[in-house]
Amino acid sequence: MKKRKAQILPVRLYGDKTLRLKAKEVTEFDENLRNFVADLTATMYAKDGVGLAAPQVGISLRIFVVDPDWFKEGGKKNPHVFINPKFKEFVGSATNEEGCLSLPGIFEKVTRAEKIIVEAFNEHGKKFSVEADGLFGRAIQHEYDHLDGILFIDKIAKLRKIFIKKFLKEIESTTDENGVNIGKMSEDEEISRIDK
Ligand code: CO
């Protein structure tokens, strides 16, 4: 049997309606789910992201993937899949710059918990718990927000929001009449399939 190739999915940009929905819990841990997780993961790597949530590719389910280390010197790909995640603990607070594949070109400081404990399921339906801080902890909190329709720009200072308003308008301007926004087709969108 031929091995399925993971697909690169179009990433939804600011203005897209799916980004603002509260995503639903996953109930079936089947082959379809695992194929989708493989596509989501491949898309995160193809777009040079450290995290990607299902709503960002137009799927309103409580799924995200995070890999905080792969882009570092000598770093290996090690995707952490979170399905139906629940926070168990928040410790301290830390402020750092964030970006988002759905908000290209925008980087702003966001304050979040310094350390978190989160419980979730993997794509095989196995429950796990993880304690995370630094970039890993921040990425988990950022991706989790996507599941509730929250974007990092919702959490920045008012003045900064005013400052970036025209950039937001620009990104938003490519949203179509159905509320879908995959932006203008760029070169990397032409590569629709890759080998995992
Ligand atoms: Co994001």
Image: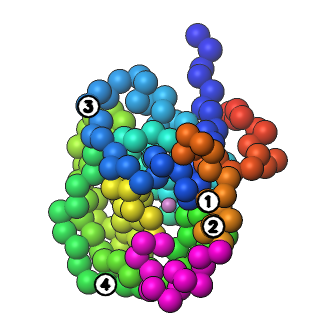
**Label annotation for residue 27:** 3
Q: Return the x and y of residue 69 as percentages of the image width and height.
A: 53, 63
Q: Earlier in the sequence, mark 3 or mark 1?
A: 3
Q: Establish if 83 lies above or below 114.
A: above
Q: Earlier in the sequence, mark 3 or mark 4?
A: 3
- Do the residues bearing badges 3 and 1 touch, measured as CB atoms within 8 Å? no
Q: Residues within 10 Å of mark 4 (few under 14, many from 20)?
A: few
The residue tagged with tag 4: helix, strand or loop? loop
Whether residue 49 is visible to the viewer of this picture, yes or no, is no
Pick the front one: 28 or 165: 165
Q: Earlier in the sequence, mark 1 or mark 4?
A: 4
Nearer the observer: mark 1 or 4; the answer is 1
Left or right relative to 77: residue 66: left
Pick the front one: 12 or 31: 12
Q: Which residue is mark 2?
A: 169
Q: CA distance from mark 2 to mark 1?
A: 5 Å
The magenta stretch spans residue 111: no
Q: CA distance from mark 1 to mark 4?
A: 31 Å
**Which residue is depicted at the point 81% across and 47% down?**
187
Residue type, mark 4 in image: Ser
Q: Which residue is mark 4?
A: 93
- Do the residues bearing badges 4 and 2 touch, measured as CB atoms within 8 Å? no
- Could you say which quadrant of the image residue 133 lies in? bottom left
Residue type, mark 1 in image: Glu
**Which residue is depicted at the point 62% across and 50% down?**
175
Q: Residues within 10 Å of mark 2 (few under 14, many from 20)?
A: few
Q: Residues within 10 Å of mark 1 (few under 14, many from 20)?
A: some
The residue tagged with tag 2: helix, strand or loop? helix
The magenta stretch spans residue 159: yes
Whether residue 29 is visible to the viewer of this picture, yes or no, is yes
